[in-house]
Image: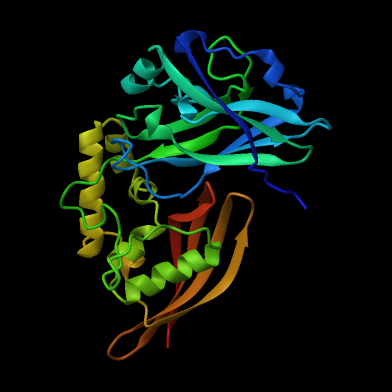
Amino acid sequence: MKRTLFSIITAFSMLLPITKAVASSELISGDFSKASVSIKFYDRTMYYPGTSNENPIWVNVSIKNNGTDTLRFKLANDRAFSVDFSAYTIKNSSMRKNNALTEKRTTSKIVYFREIAIESGESYSFVENVKNYISFDEPSIYYLEMNFYPELYNPNGSKVTSNRLNLDIRPAPSASSSSVLPVESESASVLKPESISPDRVVEQTIVARQKTLWDQYFLYMDLEQMMRRNADISRRYENASADERSRMLTSYKTDLMQNRIEYDIVAVPESFHIETTTYSENDGTVSVIEYFKYPNFREKKRFVYKVRQRDGIWQIYDYTVTNLGTE
């Protein structure tokens, strides 16, 4: 069974310009070509532009020893001197680093660090806030990766590069939005999407609609993709500014809540049952039979919800409806 090691061997400090922060090599041992670094979202939620305190992006960092010898490396108490995050746009343009981070690394100061030793097959993990490294000013989809520096941060020093994550920065909700952060009314706890199966995602969404719990209803719905099912709206959205996109999403959500558009998706079924669920690693469909009660008859429909997974969270992004008659 894989074990995670958190043993601290020794603690040191040094005083030197950070731009030349290269430690003595006798403390570092092991073949770093056999080391791997992986990152994943620690507490997945909706991400928006903003400061690190307002809407942090927590990422779990794991350093694993894939070799046969003990792996030793230095880890700064301030992780900014051991790791560096980079983000790229879909056009592969690099995002700028925080000014505070740049100032910190170019100022002579004492850097405290520890020597960590992990045995073969073991790993060492910690959590970092990406927004302490990178400023996200515009909503978009970014590619996120991290470099780990076993001899402390040095742009020209040895490093191990992690895997890439897809990071979806959404338009910041307006102050009037009902779900800047969805909250359960009874407990006042922040609602966060969980890593549940596609059929449960659809089930919870339908139940939330039956109970008129709009925050829960939108929790697993990709509103942007739902809105862009309309080709004309999609073209307008593509050419819109960040503020205009935010207004379009807010308006779309309001129209759904007031039953002005997409009548099928917001219709309230009297009852339902999940018919079939099929999915691969990242895409799937959930077929549901839903019954709608009217004064003199009951209508039966088949909804096929299209879902896809992003960073462990399934979301509804499209659907089709087939009328199956009345009873």
**Residue drawn at x 59%, y 22% as measured from the top left:** 149
Instruction: Tell me if residue 292 comes above or below residue 126 in the rendering.
Output: below
Report which quarter residue 191 is drawn in: bottom left
Which image quadrant: the C terminus?
bottom left
**Residue 193 x, y percent position in the rendering:** 43, 58
Q: Nearer the viewer, residue 152 or 161?
A: 152
**Residue 248 x, y percent position in the rendering:** 23, 44
Judged from this view, the residue extending furthest toward the right is 68
Instruction: Tell me if residue 31 comes above or below residue 210 in the rendering.
Output: above
Q: How is the image coloured?
A: rainbow
Residue 96 in view, yes or no: no
Q: Left or right of 9: which side holds 250?
A: left
Report which quarter residue 122 is drawn in: top right
Q: Please tell me how many numbered marks the rendered image carries.
A: 0
**Residue 161 x, y percent position in the rendering:** 61, 25
**Residue 154 x, y percent position in the rendering:** 54, 13
**Residue drawn at x 26%, y 60% as measured from the top left:** 256
Q: Left or right of 209: which side holds 318?
A: right
Residue 147 in view, yes or no: yes
Judged from this view, the residue extending furthest toward the bottom is 296
Q: Nearer the viewer, residue 185 or 172?
A: 185
Q: Nearer the viewer, residue 215 or 153?
A: 153
Instruction: Tell me if residue 227 comes above or below residue 207 in the rendering.
Output: above
